[in-house]
Structures are given as structure tokens and as C-alpha cells.
Image (spheres, grey):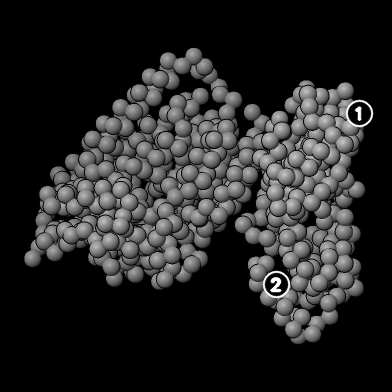
Amino acid sequence: MSYYTGIDIGSTASKVVVLSGSGIEDRFVLPTGWSSKETAREIARRLEAGGHPVGKNMKIVATGYGRVAVDYADKTVTEITCHGRGGWHLLGRDCTIIDIGGQDTKVITVEQGMPTSFLMNDKCSAGTGKFLEIMANRLGVDLAELFTLAEAGTPLAISSMCTVFAESEVISHIGAGERREDIAAGVVDSVVSKVAGLCARHTMAGELLLTGGLCDSAYLVDRLSEKLRRPIHTHPLGRYAGALGAALTARDKSR
Amino acid sequence: MSPIEQTKIRLPADFETYGEARRAGFLRMKQLKEEGARVVGMFCSFVPTELIYAAGALPVGLCAFTDEPIPAAEANLPRNLCPLIKASYGFALTDTCPYFYFSDFVVGETTCDGKKKMFELMGEIKDTYVMQLPHSRDPAALAFWREQVLAFQRKLEDFYGITITEADIRTAIRRKNRERDVMRCYLELGKLDPAPMSGYEMGTRIDAGSFSFDLEQRCDEVEERTAQALAQWEARKDRGPSSRPRLLVTGCPNAGVREKIIKAVEELGADVVAFDTCNGIREKVELVDESNPDVYDALARKYLNINCSVMSPNDSRRTYIGKMIDEYKVDGVIEIVLQSCHTYDVEAFFIRRFVTQEKGLPYLNIETDYSQADKGQINTRLAAFLETIDK
């Protein structure tokens, strides 16, 4: 039996999907940590433990910013193509995919399974998962708690375009004795506005699908949908979209 | 004292600390000056270099393409200005551009607001003459620009204490037209499929030309390289459509980001075959009309027709890009916008729409500066862009 594995080494988390001819055989996620090379080795160990060892019956495509660290991959493909292909596969039809990643955010138009155009945020962590992480840290909570807090709050203005300056704004709010819930709501609102701003610069064809680690937060999805005034699809495997796209590419490649 | 004698023929104070290539540049310029050469520094293709040649002077392109002097420039200029303007001023301020340093004077032009105001600061370092470029192409603008061409001639005559004759100008026009033809033929090698040479080499050679002083020798060298590349191409066994995507690069001057974008995208498997840029074919396509009885009108018309985004409206740029896409069999377009270059940045709206909707091709816009900070991200974008080109 042949297997097709997609490995998506992101800045925060690494995702792995193993496909066979009949569907998804295995999937797992692990933190990327400080060394992509070490992460790649750990992934090889886990694949073997799961009964799908790296070897001649397996074709591997690596993606994500750490893709070059996967020295046993047959090919590397950018995360833009992989997220596009994986997202399209999950939704099953033409769409525009919004991926909020750890260090960048992408908007990708996919037609007939293949990305046709895309836009990425520029040199800046505002509007990315990193922004939320830093702000959650500042508020002394984790990401899940940040969303729970935000749900109970009324957004305070956090208007700076820069993560470092926005953090100062958050500190000012803390200093002024504002409610943590309102600050948290402001933080999420800031990310959502920036993502919506990126979307406005792109021709948003068809339906929308949010992928990446943040698609599991119903609160964020609702806020983004509100801001864009359009429904947004999510999928339980949304955070695996990049790895799935890589696995699909591996399968195509061997046909 | 004549202006020539006033010009210092001394090396800068920090000369000994400079790298080898820069020291060689300074020594070469110093020698030229000692031999009595007249040297006029310039930045932009709107400057009618025919007049500089007619004055018996050498036009030299000034340094503007690395981030090295930008911190020095930012002491006096705002940070959110385009890197080309900051670098131009920074090189002048730090005595590190041999061509600026040994120029008799510098000729600038009011192409964009940033440059226009920067030239006022540059004027405190060196005699900086500014041509007032109008930003439209109607008859009034043409008449005004013709006056500016005449005024520049007077500046040259006054500065060097000479008289420039019509015959001098006509000779210079013929020499420059030949150069345009030679460079155009060279750049049009990109129409061949597979591409006979890399876009990286093409652009590098064109830019190196602005630092060489013998116009005829430069033309001969480029002609020779063109013939050689053509012969090699004709001898190829794999002639015919290449599977590598063929790209057109448009937008701002790209010499400062050539490694980061053009070299990178070619290493990823594409060929940059066409350049709609001011160091590409933009200034070469239209010659100065040698049959026009009014030389100043001929010069003014030619230069006013350059498809730079400072012009408004500038529809002719789209028309020309469309023609290039067809003639060079282009599969995708990359637009390079230097940070804070408002005119190209805004005009990109039309270029994107034209390329994607009217020509049905993928389009990638990269906004960047001379730093290496975004190298990784640009590489990912370029790779993803090539992945969207189904070839």
C-alpha cells in the first residue's frame, strides 16, 4: 500500500496528514519548538510509531516556513498552494480561503482545486496568530481563555497597526483599570479588522473558508463573518489544511 | 577660476577605508577628471542626456541602489521615503559614490515629490540643477518641457562657458538613438523561447552601462553580447517553448532588489524575459525624431512620452505592457513597488486589473525596500506565484 504524507511546519505548530488511496490514515499536530530540524525528526519517529514509516512506500511533501528542514521530503511546496488545495478539498468547491497563521495571514482564491491568486500580509505580525499570542500573554491567559474573556466583553479600541505599539495600548488599558474582558475583546477585534483589511484588497470570489489554528474559535469566526458581512465556513480539520494540501500534492505527484 | 578648476580633484577623506571596487571607481573617476573630463551626474531617464553629450560632457548615473548609506540619509530625511531617494542622498552625504563625488554638478528632475524635495537638500552638498518635469502630455505641458530642455542647455553653456550648437545636439541625438537601438535589440532577446539568457544578466549589464563612459564602446560590447547570445540560441537543440514560466517585471527601478527578486525567482525556476522598467526597455522603445526640424521639440516629445507612473494619466504604460505580454509570450507579471513610491503603488491598481482581467494572467505585487529583512517572505511569495502558473 502506498501512503502520501503532507508535513506542514508552521512557525507555531507542525501538522501532519497521512493519506492512502482511500482517505486520511493518520494525522497529528505538535508544537514546532525552537528547531524545525528536531521537529522534522520527531515527526519521522511519530510516523513510524503510527505504522507509516518514512520509506519507499511513502511520498512526502513538506510545506510551511520550516519546509526545508524536512530533509527526507520528496518535494517542498509553498504553504500558499498547500492551504489552497487542502482548503478546497475540505470544502469541496471553489472558494476563497483565509488562513490566519502563526506569523502571517493569507487570502487565497482557489478554482478547480488549484490556487489562482493570493495575497499575504506584509512584514508584520499584526493580524496574525502571533499578535493574539503576545496579547494573551500580556493578559496572563492562554488563547482559549482569551476568546472566552473576549466573548464576555465590549471591544476597547486597539488601533495601532504595529504589534509592539498595540501591546503598549493594551498596557495603557491595563494601567487605566479597564476590564480584562473588554481588553480581550479589543484584541480579537483588532486582529479581525486587520484580516478584513487584507481581504478587502483581494477579490473575494465564491464562498469563504477559514483555515489555520484559529478556525476552531467560534467567537473569532463570528466576529470575522460580521466584519466581512459574509458567512464563513470552517471545518473540523481546518488547521490541517496545509498538511492535507501537501499530502494531496504528494499523491498527484506520484500519479 | 573656471568651474572645472573649482571642482576638487582630491579623494575623499575616508578613501583608504573603502572596499576595493569602490576605491577603483574613485581612482578611475579621479583620472578622468585629471584628464579634463566634464562630468554631469544624474539619476533619472527623463534627463535629456543628448544635451550633456552635446556639451562635450559625460552623463553618469549616480549610486542609488544599496541600503548602506540609508541610515546616514535618515538623519536628515524622513524614514518613510522611498529607499532610492534615501540611498541617492545618503551616498551624496557620505562621499561614498565616486560618480557623485567627482561630478561637476548634478541634474535632478521633479519626477516625484520625494525626489523633488530631496534635491533641495542635495543642493547644500553640491550644485544641483533641477529640471521641472510637467506631469501630463498636453500641448501646454510639451511647450513648458521644451522650455525646460532649453534652460538645461543654457545651464550647461553657462557652467562650462561654452556654446552648444544645433549640430552638436544632432550628433548627440544620433549617438543616443544608436544606443537605444542597441539596448532594445539586446533586451528583445527576451522574446526568444527558451530565453537565451537570464533576466538577471540582462538587467545587470544594462545597469553597468550607466557607469561606463565610452558610449560607442558600451554599444559595441552590448552588440557583441547580443550577437553571441543569438548565435548560442540558434545552435541550441532544445529550441521551442520552454516549460519555465516566462515573466515580465514592471514597476519601480529594480537594481536595488535584483538579487532579492529577479535572481530569486529565476532560481526558483522562472525566466524573467521582459522589463517594463526605467532600466529596461521603457526609455528605449521611442527614439528622438531625427527628422524633426526643431531639435528641442524632438527631445521634449521623446522624453515626455516615457511611461513613468509620475505621468497622469499614464494609460500608455498599460497599452505597452499589453503589447509586451503578447510579443514576449509572457506567463505572469511581477510588479515591484519600492516602499513609499506613491505613484507606482497607486497605479498598481490599474496594472493588476489590466493584467488579470484583460490579459488573463497571474499578477504578483511585491512592495519592498533595499533591506534583507523580507527575503524569506518574498521567496515564499515568488514560489507560490510560480505554483499558480500552470505551465
Q: Residue furthest left?
A: B1
Q: Quadrant of the N terminus of chain A?
A: top right
Work out how far the residue at label 2 is from the one at label 1, CA to CA, in angstroms.
Answer: 47 Å
Q: In front: A73, or B356?
A: A73
Residue at the disc numbered 2: A167
The disc numbered 1 marks a residue on which chain? A
Q: Quadrant of the C terminus of chain A?
A: top right
Q: Where is residue A235 shown, x and y percent of the image?
A: 89, 48
Please tell me whether mark 1 sits on a helix, a strand or a loop.
loop
Mark number for residue A59? none
The disc numbered 2 marks a residue on which chain? A
Q: Residues within 10 Å of mark 1 (few under 14, many from 20)?
A: few
Is residue A75 visible in this depiction of the protein?
yes
Q: Is residue A37 above or below residue A143?
A: above
Earlier along the polypeptide chain: callout 2 or callout 1?
Answer: 1
Residue at the disc numbered 1: A22
Circles 2 and 1 on the same subunit: yes
- Kind of residue at disc 1: Ser
Q: Where is residue B295 shown, x and y percent of the image?
A: 23, 47
Would residue A185 appear left or right of B90 to someone viewing this image? right
Please tell me whether mark 2 sits on a helix, a strand or a loop.
helix
Would residue A159 appear left or right of A1 to someone viewing this image? left
Q: Where is residue B15 shown, x and y percent of the image?
A: 26, 58
Q: Where is residue B189 shown, x and y percent of the image?
A: 42, 29
Indicate the quadrant where residue B331 lies: top right
